Structures are given as C-alpha cells and as structure tokens.
Amino acid sequence: MKEEQGDESHSSVIKVGGAVVEDPEQLKELLDEFTKIEGPKVLVHGGGRSATKLASQLGIESQMVGGRRITDAETLRVVTMVYAGLVNKNIVAQLQARGILALGLTGADLDLIRSHRRPITPEGLDFGFVGDVDRTAGERLQQLLQLGITPVIAPLTHDGQGQLLNTNADTVAQSIAVAIASAGVSLTFCFELPGVLSNPSDPSTLIPHLTEKDFQALVANGTIAGGMIPKLENAFSALRAGVGSVRITDIHHLQGGTLITL
C-alpha cells in the first residue's frame, strides 16, 4: 500500500462520517492523518447529526427510514446549509491551515455529480429530494487533482434541471472512486470501528484482509451481519468497477483497518 501511495498517479478517496467531522477532537485527528497521505486525494464527508440538530432548532422534524433521511423542501434547505456550508467550509479552512490546497464542492459544482430523484417505492415511501447517482465527471476531478487541488466534497448532487438532491455520502465516495479508477485509486470508508470485526464488540478481532469469497462465508455463518453487509457490498461493487482497493477503518488508521480485495 505504501508503494502504491508513493505513485503520483495513484489517488486516494477518503469518506468520513458525520460523527467524526462534527467532533472537534476527532476531526483534528482525522485531518492530521489525512494530511499524511501522499499523492492526490479527495475527502468526502457527511454531517447528518449537525443537520438534525439545526433542523430541530428551526422546528423541522427529521424523519429517518433505514438510516436514510426523508428530505422534504425544508429539510433540503437545512442539509444544504449544513453540508455545503458549515461542515464543508470548516474542513476546508482546517486543511488550508495544514498546508493543503483544499477546494470545497458539492456534486452541483462543476457539474461533478448528476443524479435523479429517487422514485417512490412500491410500498408508497417517498424519500423526497434524495438523489441516486447517474454519472460522475471523473475527468474534471482528475484535472483538479493534477493541479494539486484537494477536493472536499459534500453529499449533495443535482439533476441537471436546477434541483439539488441530498445523496448518501458512501454512494458519493464510491461514485467518485469509480470515476477516477482508470488512473489508479484506493477508497477508504472511515467510521467508528477499526475495521471489519469478527466480534463487533471486541476491537482486537479485526479482520485485516477480506476477499469476496471470505465475505460470503462470513455472512453465511453469521459473523458479518446487519449494516456491515451493505457497506461491504458497496466495497465489492467498487472493486468490480475498477477501484484498486477498498479499506474500512477508523480515524486512527487510515492506511490500516480491513483491506478489501476481490
């Protein structure tokens, strides 16, 4: 992995959850680790807890279904203010202080990520202004990276008709990694655990390397369950689309955790 990161053509896409970016100490540690990564890099962030807090202060009820936010017009205004504004610019400012030429963006900026509004489910569930990604402008991202710019991307996309759409940050990170995969890219999902664990309550049970065959066996015997299954399915989907490697880890070990390969 170190050899890979020393290759100037190799890029790193790091996705970090809202719980980290909203805690000053965790954010500081994350950005210190992110700064150490060599070569071109992209940071994709969430910010859901801050959005929920602001919505509550404004008297707007937050509705979640299966971990996904129902995004009506008022909620879209809140997540736009929080994701593209407060959270994004705070990260950008802190990266500038570390000597990184950071540029805060959403999927609407530079027409980076086009999406369509998620259709109403057969059960009648309407997620509102939530976007499912159609395409990502990899060439434009590569141009920014070649200029030495580090994009910091908030999880908002657009439909090409003037409508912003709230989009899952994991999906945004995956689509970015796939879009620039031809130049060589690694994708890291950073969350609260040190990686994929054989016992979720015991951090010492880290699985350092996981293949698709291993994954299927561990799902079958119940070792991997719950929310980790879709996260890993996303990881293997990215690998099949050309991403070189995927890691799942925490803020302390951006180049450690669980390495996922086909």
Image (spheres, rainbow, N blue to C red):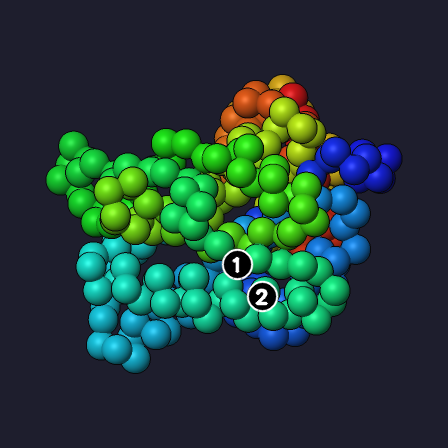
Residue type highlighted by circle 2: Ile
Residue type highlighted by circle 1: Gly
- Residue at 35% across / 62% down in the picture? 79
Count the numbered circles shown: 2
Q: Please tell me whether residue 135 is drawn above or below residue 191 in the rendered image.
A: above
The residue to which callout 1 is attached is 104
Q: Residues within 10 Å of mark 2 (few under 14, many from 20)?
A: many
Decide: marks 2, 1 in contact (CB < 8 A)?
yes
Quarter of the picture holding the C terminus:
top right
Q: Is residue 113 left or right of residue 56?
A: right
Q: Position of residue 242 (x, y in %)?
A: 60, 23
- Residue 91 marker: 2
Asked whether 92 or 196 is in front, the reply is 92
Q: Position of residue 205 (x, y in %)?
A: 72, 45
| SS at circle 2 | helix
- Of all residues, the one furthest to the bottom in this rendering is 57
